[in-house]
Amino acid sequence: MALSANRATGFGEPSQIHTLAALHAELGQYSEALRLLAHRQDVLFGNGPEPEDWYVIGRALEGYGLVEDADRAYLRAE
């Protein structure tokens, strides 16, 4: 459903992109999750991760075994 929603908007809705990125992170597909977050930044014309992005970043870091870095990322998500 998240993929279909993103396709319907041409991957142009930041909240939907974030949802899909979070799903990829939960499935252990960290590189795809981070790629989607980078695309989200392009859509938002952002200057860096938004607070909600830090959860996905934390999941990726944790998946790569960087637990201390993941903990710091999770703190930024609050």
Image: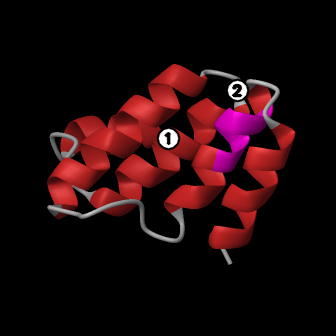
Q: Residue at x 30, y 59 (%)?
A: 14
Give percent across and percent down for residue 49: 41, 60
Q: N-terminal of the two: label 1 or label 2? A: 1
Q: Residue at x 43, y 68 (%)?
A: 50
The overriding secondary structure of the stretch rendered in magenta is helix
Chain part drawn in magenta? 58-62
Q: In 3D space, how far apart are the residues under numbered discs 1 and 2 (Cα atoms)?
A: 10 Å
Viewer-side residue, 11 vs 7: 11
Relative to 37, 40 lies left or right: left
> Quadrant of the image for the C terminus?
bottom right
Relative to 65, 18 lies left or right: left
Relative vertical location of residue 54 with respect to residue 78 in this rendering, above or below? above
Q: What's the amino acid at mark 1?
A: Ala
Here the colouring is secondary structure
Viewer-side residue, 31 vs 68: 68
* Quadrant of res 47: bottom left
Q: Residues within 10 Å of mark 1 (few under 14, many from 20)?
A: many
Callout 1 touching callout 2 (CB < 8 Å): no
Relative to 8, 34 lies left or right: right
Relative vertical location of residue 70 with respect to residue 45 in this rendering, above or below? above
Residue 24 within the magenta-colored segment of the rendering? no
Query: What residue is disc 1 on?
Result: 21
Q: Residue at x 78, y 34 (%)?
A: 66
Query: What residue is disc 2 on?
Result: 27
Give percent across and percent down for residue 77: 64, 69
Give percent across and percent down for residue 43: 17, 54
Relative vertical location of residue 59 with respect to residue 24 in this rendering, above or below? below
Q: Residues within 10 Å of mark 2 (few under 14, many from 20)?
A: few
Count numbered badges in the picture: 2
Give percent across and percent down for residue 4: 36, 35
* Quadrant of res 15: bottom left
Name, please, the residue furthest toward the front.
68
